[in-house]
């Protein structure tokens, strides 16, 4: 079985799997046994996340018509420091729609308001 320890990408402190953020610097933790290229990508992503937006249960903040659109929204949120997760919308989890169909973008509850503000493209 692989090492289940987590690693801080900034200061290299190690933590048990139950932790999410480094106690010293507040960075999101990555798996210690991740391949170097994967760890490098995760470090870049982790450095963008604002820990204050990573608390609480996941809530839906956006709906996209396709996977690429949902990934674009997730990228916009990440640039604002808001972590997100993309999942298929309910009712589209049948084999014919696995690669297509609408997606939901979810963020931790503490980042929901900031996410909605970041995604509000309405002009006054």
Image (tube, helix red, strand yellow):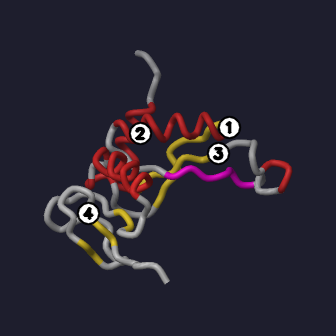
Q: Is 55 rendered above or below residue 85?
A: below
Between 94 and 29, the one lying in front of the other is: 29
The earlier-in-sequence mark between 3 and 1 is 1
- Give the Cα separation between the discs numbered 3 and 1: 6 Å
Which residue in the protein does label 3 denote?
103
Q: Are marks 3 and 1 in contact (CB under 8 Å)?
A: yes
Query: Would you identify the image quadrant in which residue 51 lies?
Result: bottom left
Looking at the image, the residue that sits furthest to the bottom is: 1
Closer mark to the observer between disc 1 and disc 4: 4
| Secondary element at image label 2 | helix
Q: Is 31 rendered above or below residue 90?
A: below
- Give the Cα separation between the discs numbered 1 and 4: 33 Å
Q: Position of residue 116 (x, y in %)?
A: 43, 39
The earlier-in-sequence mark between 4 and 2 is 4
The residue at 39%/57% (across/down) is 36
Query: For residue 86: magenta?
Result: yes
Between 95 and 1, the one lying in front of the other is: 1
Point out the stretch of residues depicted in magenta.
Answer: 85-90
Q: Is 31 rendered above or below residue 42?
A: below
| Secondary element at image label 4 | loop
Q: In the visual, does 105 lie left or right of 114?
A: right
Looking at the image, the residue that sits furthest to the top is: 124
| Secondary element at image label 3 | strand
Which residue in the protein does label 2 denote?
77
Estimate how packed mark 3 is, as few (under 14), some (14 to 19) or many (20 or more) residues with alpha carbons within 10 Å: many
Which mark, residue 66? 1
The residue at 35%/41% (across/down) is 114
Which residue in the protein does label 4 denote?
8
């Amino acid at each position: 079985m692989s090492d289940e320890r987590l690693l801080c990408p900034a200061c290299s402190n190690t933590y048990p799997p139950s932790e999410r953020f480094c106690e010293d610097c507040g960075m999101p933790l990555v798996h210690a046994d991740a391949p170097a290229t994967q760890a490098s990508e995760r470090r870049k992503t982790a450095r963008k996340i604002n820990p204050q937006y990573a608390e609480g249960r996941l809530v839906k903040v956006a709906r996209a018509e396709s996977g690429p659109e949902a990934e674009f929204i997730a990228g916009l949120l990440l640039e604002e420091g808001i972590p997100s997760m993309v999942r298929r919308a309910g009712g589209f989890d049948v084999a014919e729609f696995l690669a297509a169909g609408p997606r939901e973008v979810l963020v931790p509850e503490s980042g929901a308001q900031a996410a909605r503000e970041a995604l509000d493209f309405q002009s006054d």
